[in-house]
Amino acid sequence: MPKLLRLDRNANGSADGVATLAATVAPPLQLEPADHWTPESGKGVELSVDREIEERFLAAPLIAIDFPAFNDGRGLSQAVLLRNRCGYQGDLIATGAVQPDILHYMRRCGFTAAVLPNGGVPDPQTLEPYSDYYQASATEPEPASRRIGKSASNIPK
């Protein structure tokens, strides 16, 4: 049975800002295909990776992006566009061929949850494999060079 895995920080009660993994049996998500979705439905919208983002989708309480294959990264790009260019603030859920080894990329791109097709719960290290990143992302808009400069007083001499 598929499980919904929360990817966002503090979503699972973590007070220290460290992301934790919590999987729950996923109830059927209340989604409608993009062609039939309207803001009045109160449901989330389901986008395929080749679907153009329309302004009306930004009113959805959640957007599910379907990954058609394990080697298709277009859903990651779609998430970044939704977060950075469109300013979407709702839940972004990855569905389809979601692989545990890219969960940390999904979170950095702005996903808040993923539906794992095999029902397993990955090792928590999967979500935080590195202590920091050089690049900016949807979740951390400043690159390391700017972050380090701002906290230079914290660096031991």
Image (cartoon, helix red, strand yellow):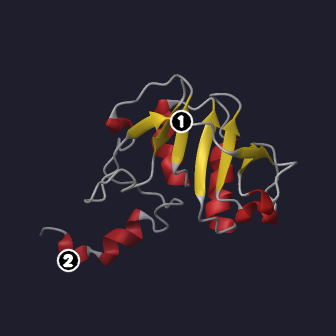
Point 64% across, 65% down: residue: 88
Secondary structure at numbered mark 2: helix
Image: 58 above or below 34: below
Q: How far apart are marks 1 and 2 (CA)?
A: 45 Å
Q: Which mark is residue 14?
A: none
Image: 31 above or below 23: below
Please indicate whether residue 64 sits to the left or right of residue 118 in the image: right
76 and 34: which is toward the camera: 34
- Residue 51, position in %: x, y? 81, 47
| Label 1 with label 2: CB-CB less than 8 Å | no
Point 26% across, 59% down: residue: 15
- Residue 152, position in %: x, y? 25, 75
Name the amino acid type tagged 1: Ala
Question: To which residue does mark 2 refer?
Answer: 153
Please indicate whether residue 72 sits to the left or right of residue 41 in the image: left
Q: Which of marks 1 and 2 is in front?
A: 1
- Residue 50, position in %: x, y? 80, 43
Crowding around mark 2 (Cα neighbors within 10 Å: few <14, some 14 to 19, many 20+) is: few
Looking at the image, tell me whether mark 1 or mark 2 is earlier in sequence order: 1
Question: To which residue does mark 1 refer?
Answer: 26
71 and 35: which is toward the camera: 35
- Residue 110, position in %: x, y? 55, 55
